């Protein structure tokens, strides 16, 4: 046999190897190894646990940036992430500005708690009006008669109050200011609700961790943070008087009771200032935000499927991680609403089958 046929065979084998390698590479390239998310710090301890477990069980890594609800909404709008996260649902006006429908998928509920730094004080009660006036800066010292009257058995120090708030756009801020706007006409008229507001008084910290750190380091401080941040740092919590007149500490039970109400099909609902007899009044949902039409910014169908699989797991099997981290799980009716929202996702206008 001459060298020419042998060389031709080797050439064709080489071409076939390259072709097969390309096919395998293309198939491997379609396999999603990572999803990008960004947003709320309030559920970050839960999401960190969920995403680590999901990676171990199913493979894809979830790169989540805990940058605040405002940042999560902004990055979703910029189409730089697969999903956003927020504790403040988007308004009708904000949703109408998007060319692609934005879905709100509730993951759990949580409490925004008031933690304080008062040497020698382990129990503290606060009424809605007193709490609002503290953050308005009109009650300036801890031994003020209005605080002392509702804490007759507590020796309150003559210490200046330092209120601590979020310096970044925050769903935690939205929940807290939404509550204050419902219970205090003065707060509503002077400040109002929002993810970012013009604070009349106090110090600002970035993220829940930043607020918790300032409170821990500042005698006389009081700040609002996610429940898990206070528990992890062994910080004292104030009891807040609810609409029924009961002073309630945040707990899984009191947060779950706050959500014992009918919510709209799109799940955008405020549950602050609950009428539930033993519900904690500063409670709220936290949502994953996703585009309904998943074909955006050159995303593949595999990315769309991976996103849908993750979201279904978070409201399904992933709920087992909610309670141990002091968040309240979705009720069965709300979980069904969340499932219906996820099933409405499309790719090129077609339902996404997984």
Image (cartoon, rainbow, N blue to C red):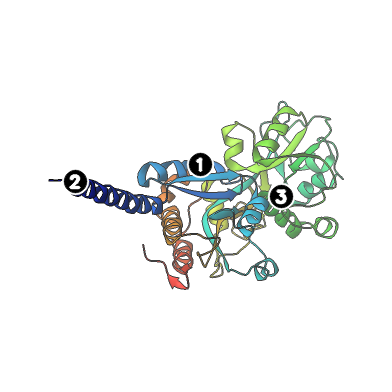
Please state the horizontal and vertical placement of residue 219, each as a whole percent of the image: 76, 28
Up-down: is 174 above or below 138?
below
Please state the horizontal and vertical placement of residue 79, each as a whole percent of the image: 59, 58
Tag 3's secondary structure?
Answer: loop
Residue in the foreground of this view, choosing between 57 and 278? 57
Identify the residue under disc 2. 6
Is 254 displayed left or right of 236 in the figure? Answer: left
The alpha-carbon separation of the residues under discs 3 and 1 comes to: 20 Å
Q: Residue visible at 36% across and 49% down?
A: 25
Identify the residue under disc 1. 48
Decide if residue 11 is in sight here.
yes
Identify the residue under disc 3. 169
**Are circles 2 and 1 on residues that touch, CB within 8 Å?**
no
Up-down: is 242 above or below 223?
below
Number of the front mark, 2 or 1: 2
Residue in the foreground of this view, choosing between 233 and 160? 233
Q: Quadrant of the C terminus?
A: bottom left
Q: Residue visible at 85% across and 56% down?
A: 190
Is 271 displayed left or right of 215 in the figure? Answer: left
Q: Residue visible at 68% across and 66% down?
A: 94
Residue in the foreground of this view, choosing between 55 and 162? 55
Please state the horizontal and vertical placement of residue 191, each as a whole percent of the image: 82, 55
Q: Residues within 10 Å of mark 2 (few under 14, many from 20)?
A: few
Q: Which residue ends up furthest to the front in the rendered image? A: 2
Tag 2's secondary structure?
Answer: helix
Up-down: is 52 above or below 191?
above
Decide if residue 326 is in sight here.
no
Disc 2 or 1, which lies upstream in sequence?
2
Number of marks: 3
Mark identifier at residue 174: none
Please state the horizontal and vertical placement of residue 117, each as a whole percent of the image: 72, 31
């Amino acid at each position: 046999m001459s060298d020419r046929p042998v060389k031709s065979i080797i050439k064709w084998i080489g071409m076939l190897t390259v072709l097969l390698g390309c096919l395998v590479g293309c198939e491997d390239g379609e396999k999603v190894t990572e999803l990008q998310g960004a947003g709320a710090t309030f559920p970050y301890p839960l999401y960190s646990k969920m995403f680590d477990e999901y990676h171990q069980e199913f493979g894809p890594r979830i790169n989540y940036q805990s940058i605040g609800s405002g940042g999560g909404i902004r990055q979703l709008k910029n189409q730089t992430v697969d999903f956003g996260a927020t504790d403040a649902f988007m308004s009708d006006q904000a949703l109408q500005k998007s060319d692609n429908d934005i879905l709100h998928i509730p993951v759990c509920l949580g409490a925004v708690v008031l933690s304080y730094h008062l040497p020698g004080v382990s129990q503290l009660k606060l009424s809605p009006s007193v709490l609002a006036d503290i953050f308005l800066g009109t009650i300036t010292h801890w031994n003020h008669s209005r605080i002392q009257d509702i804490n007759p058995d507590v020796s309150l120090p003559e210490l200046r109050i330092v209120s601590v708030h979020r310096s970044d756009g925050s769903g935690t801020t939205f929940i807290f200011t939404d509550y204050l706007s419902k219970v205090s006409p003065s707060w509503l008229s002077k400040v109002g609700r929002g993810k970012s507001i013009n604070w009349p008084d106090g110090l600002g910290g970035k993220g829940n961790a930043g607020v918790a750190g300032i409170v821990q380091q500042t005698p006389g401080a009081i700040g609002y943070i996610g429940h898990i941040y206070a528990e992890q740092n062994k910080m004292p919590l104030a009891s807040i008087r609810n609409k029924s007149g009961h002073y309630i500490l945040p707990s899984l039970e009191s947060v779950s009771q706050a959500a014992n109400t009918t919510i709209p099909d799109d799940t955008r609902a405020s549950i602050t200032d609950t009428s539930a007899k033993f519900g904690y009044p500063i409670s709220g949902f936290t949502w994953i935000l996703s585009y309904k039409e998943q074909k955006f910014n050159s995303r593949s169908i595999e990315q769309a499927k991976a996103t849908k699989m993750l979201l279904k797991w978070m409201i399904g099997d992933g709920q087992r991680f909610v309670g141990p981290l002091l968040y309240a799980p979705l009720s069965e009716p709300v979980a069904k609403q969340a499932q219906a929202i996820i099933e409405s996702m499309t790719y090129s206008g077609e339902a996404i089958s997984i």
